[in-house]
Image (cartoon, rainbow, N blue to C red):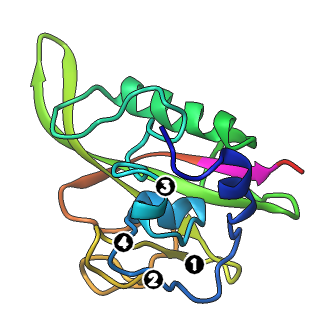
């Protein structure tokens, strides 16, 4: 499915990128994973959760939060990234980085949440958080109210609501 072998893809992961080059061919998921590679070099939908692992993807449909988590965790496994759920305030070990997942509630019916979109942010070396909003924005450490993101639980990303945080570690 991928134009780029997984081993090459995982070797290109930048835990703490200094400079983001591919502004208009990566999204928030690529940014959170540290994959500054044009999507066209991997797969048309490579930066949709679940595509890297070949599981499935969440393109143009509503989905449940559990589906999103399943897709993300399968991608971690495929990329040989260890992961654990944590609180955003928790300390992490050397070689780890944090990402947080947000979702946009589309509908709530029969006791079930249907989501229409997701968003990811990542923790920086200085302790602040940053994100790349969609395909056409530069990475920023500001939320929608132009406040520096210091904790995902307290930032304002409009309709996107904080869901969970992971500590990630790229296995050698």
Q: What is the x, y in percent for residue 169?
A: 78, 52
Q: Which of marks 3 and 4 is in front?
A: 3
The residues bearing labels 1 and 4 have C-alpha atoms spaced at a distance of: 24 Å
Q: What is the x, y in percent for residue 17?
A: 64, 79
- Residues marked 2 and 1 touching at CB (< 8 Å): yes
Secondary element under disc 3, as helix, strand or loop, is loop
On the image, numbered disc 1 is attached to which residue?
Answer: 128
Q: Which mark is residue 42?
A: 3
- Residues marked 2 and 3 touching at CB (< 8 Å): no
The residues bearing labels 3 and 1 have C-alpha atoms spaced at a distance of: 29 Å
Secondary element under disc 2, as helix, strand or loop, is loop
Query: Quick one: label 3 or label 1, which is nearer the N terminus?
Result: 3
Q: What is the x, y in percent for residue 142?
A: 38, 83
Quarter location, residue 38:
bottom left
Residue 156 in view (yes/no): yes
Query: Quick one: label 1 or label 4, which is nearer the N terminus?
Result: 4
On the image, numbered disc 4 is attached to which residue?
Answer: 25
Query: Quick one: label 2 or label 1, which is nearer the N terminus?
Result: 1
Secondary element under disc 1, as helix, strand or loop, is loop
Which contiguous range is marked in magenta? 166-170
Is 10 left, or right, of 161 in this rendering? right
Q: Which mark is residue 141?
A: 2
- Residues marked 4 and 2 touching at CB (< 8 Å): no
Q: Residue 102 carries which label?
A: none
User: Alpha-carbon neighbours of circle 4 within 10 Å: few (<14), some, or many (≥20)?
Assistant: some
């Amino acid at each position: 499915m991928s134009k780029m072998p997984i081993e090459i893809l995982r070797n290109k992961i930048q835990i703490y990128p200094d400079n983001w080059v591919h502004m208009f061919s990566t999204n928030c998921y690529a940014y959170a994973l540290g994959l500054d590679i044009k999507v066209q070099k991997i797969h048309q939908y490579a930066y949709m959760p679940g595509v890297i692992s070949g599981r499935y993807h969440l393109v143009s449909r509503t989905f449940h939060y559990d589906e999103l988590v399943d897709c993300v965790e399968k991608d971690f496994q495929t990329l040989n990234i260890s992961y654990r759920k944590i609180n955003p305030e928790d300390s992490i070990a050397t070689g780890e980085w944090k990402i947080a997942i947000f979702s946009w509630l589309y509908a709530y019916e029969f006791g079930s949440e249907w989501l229409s979109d997701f968003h990811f942010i990542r923790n920086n070396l200085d302790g602040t958080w940053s994100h790349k909003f969609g395909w056409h924005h530069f990475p920023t450490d500001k939320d929608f109210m132009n406040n520096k993101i210091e904790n995902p639980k307290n930032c304002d990303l409009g309709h996107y609501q904080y869901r969970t945080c992971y500590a990630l570690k790229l296995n050698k």
